[in-house]
Image: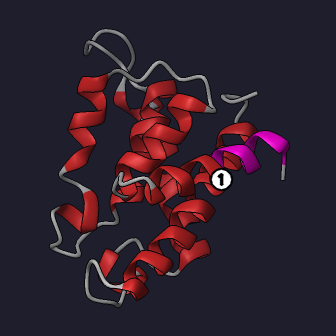
Amino acid sequence: MSELSEKIGTAAGNAFKSGFNCGEAILQAFRTEGGLKIDDNTMRMVTAFGGGMGHARAVCGALVGSVMVISYFVGRTSPQEKPLPEVYPYSKEYHDLFVKEFGSSECKDLMPYEFNTREHLINCLKLVNRMGKFLAEYLESKGFLK
């Protein structure tokens, strides 16, 4: 584990503790410690994914935020820029690694507690910290983050 991945994990946990939800915390960590130029509108776009899409307990908001960060490096701004087969393998690979590491991509499996309870906050704080580190390590392994 690199010093940078450690810093990003800590920053993600701190962002969560300060009131950001899981998806926002991932973006905020890469915004502050990863040097990514993530604007306020992009931050707003991840907000509704917290709690597995607005407390629906569906796909993990931190995973959504993570894939948004991956897209920062491999995404496109027009269909002519690059074909999707060059982009999708990164998010698929990361999803599969995420499930292997954390056991699921679903909030309901990762966070079995009622929202806004002490147990929920402790559980998600630990997860968001680990997920920030995990994403940073993935990006470093691909040469996107140095």
Instruction: Answer whether residue 86 is magenta in the image.
Output: no
Q: Nearer the viewer, residue 108 or 92?
A: 108
Colouring style:
secondary structure
- Foreground residue, 10 or 89? 10
The C terminus - image quarter: top right
Q: What residue is rendered at 23% in x and 55% in y?
A: 49
Compared with 128, 10 (above or below) is: above
Measured as percent of width and height from the top left, residue 10 is found at 65, 53
Q: Among all residues in the image, which is located at the extreme right?
A: 2
Q: What are the residue bounds of the magenta stretch?
A: 2-9
State the count of labels: 1
Pointer 1 residue: 10
Q: Is residue 135 above or below residue 146?
A: below
- Local packing at callout 1 (Cα closer than 10 Å; few below 14, some 14-19, many 20+) is many
Say whether residue 3 is left or right of residue 142.
right
The percent position of residue 12, horizontal first and vertical second, equals: 54, 51
Kindly identify the residue that appears in the image at 55 percent across and 35 percent down.
30
In the displayed structure image, the side of residue 110 where residue 136 appears, left or right:
right
Against 55, is 81 above or below? above
Q: Label 1 is placed on what type of residue? A: Thr
Give me the residue at 26% from left, 12% from top.
Answer: 78
Give the left or right position of residue 2, taking residue 18 as reference.
right
Q: Quadrant of residue 72?
A: top left
Point out residue 87 in the picture as x, y percentages from the top left corner.
44, 33
Q: Secondary structure at mark 1?
A: helix
Residue name at image x 33 percent, y 56 percent: 21
Q: Main secondary structure of the magenta part?
A: helix
| x, y percent for residue 138 | 67, 47
Drawn side of residue 110 relative to residue 79, left or right: right
